[in-house]
Structures are given as structure tokens and as C-alpha cells.
Image: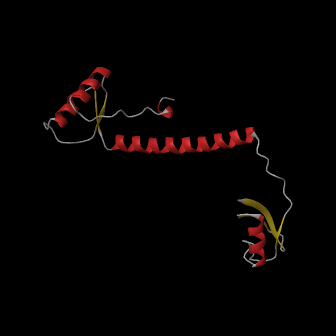
Amino acid sequence: MIRYELSCDNGHTFEGWFGSADDFDRQQTMALVTCPTCGSPHVAKRLMAPSVSTARKKETRQDMVMQAGHKEMMSKLREIVTTIRANSEDVGERFPEEARKIHYGETEQRGLIGKASAEEVRDLLDEGVEIAPLPVLPDDTN
């Protein structure tokens, strides 16, 4: 792909992406390249500085993409945790006992959140009780 800075005869500037330089020329000859602002087919390439890819620029772009992805992931994770908390009963320290009651059919099925020690978690998992920890997100502790 190649990116061109373009301008029309009315002075509007915009950019266009093409498969190659020949692709731009072919589309322009067929009057397919038009100004998105006014529709003029009289479009010309503008002088533009070459895009030089340096290791630093590449790292910066990768960091920006990773940061955006991380932000999106944290937002989705926060949304999931909020939904779970809103739809669950917080039983605090009684969590292992209440989870067992649900597992063995002694009480109605419902969503629970609460606290359990590492040993209690191991015991629940050994018994086949399906549990999962809720993550503590960075903003939750600040």
C-alpha cells in the first residue's frame, strides 16, 4: 500500500491509499479519484516528506498499539467484574460454606462472591466446587 497526500482544484487536501503508484495513475485516468469534500475529479498528488521508519518510531507505534490494547482489555475486564459483582451475593467469610451448600444442592443456585483462604480454595477445588477468583484491578486499590 502507498499513501498519497492529495489536493483538488478547489484547494481541499486529503489522503488516499492505493495498491501502487500505477494503481493511483490508473484510477485517476478513469476519474475514480475524487475529492471527498467537493467531489471534484481534478485531483493531484501533493509534495510530501518521505516516511522513514526508524527503530524508535517503530517501538513508539508498537507501544501505542499495545497501550491501546491494554486499555481496551482492562476496560472489558473491569466491565466483567462489575457485572459479576452486581449479579452476585457477597457472603464474605462464609464463601466456602455457601459454595459447598450450592454445590451439594442444599440451597438454591446463585452467584456468590466472598473470601476464602488458599487452603479453603484448594479444598473446594478438590471437592469439584466450581469457583474462580475475581481479579483485583489496579484502580481498585488506589
Q: Residue at x 79, y 50 (%)?
A: 51
Residue nearest the viewer, comparing 42 with 13: 42
Q: Residue at x 70, y 64 (%)?
A: 19
Residue nearest the viewer, comparing 133 with 26: 26
Q: Residue at x 82, y 52 (%)?
A: 50
Q: Quadrant of residue 107?
A: top left
Which percent across, then down, holds residue 93? 27, 25
Residue nearest the viewer, comparing 36 with 85: 36
Does 84 sit above or below residue 135?
below
Which percent across, then down, holds residue 117? 31, 22
Task: Specify whether 43 is left or right of 137.
Answer: right
Q: Residue furthest top?
A: 119
Residue 108, visible in the rendered structure: yes
Q: Residue furthest right?
A: 47
Does 1 sit above or below residue 37?
above
Q: Quadrant of residue 69?
A: top right
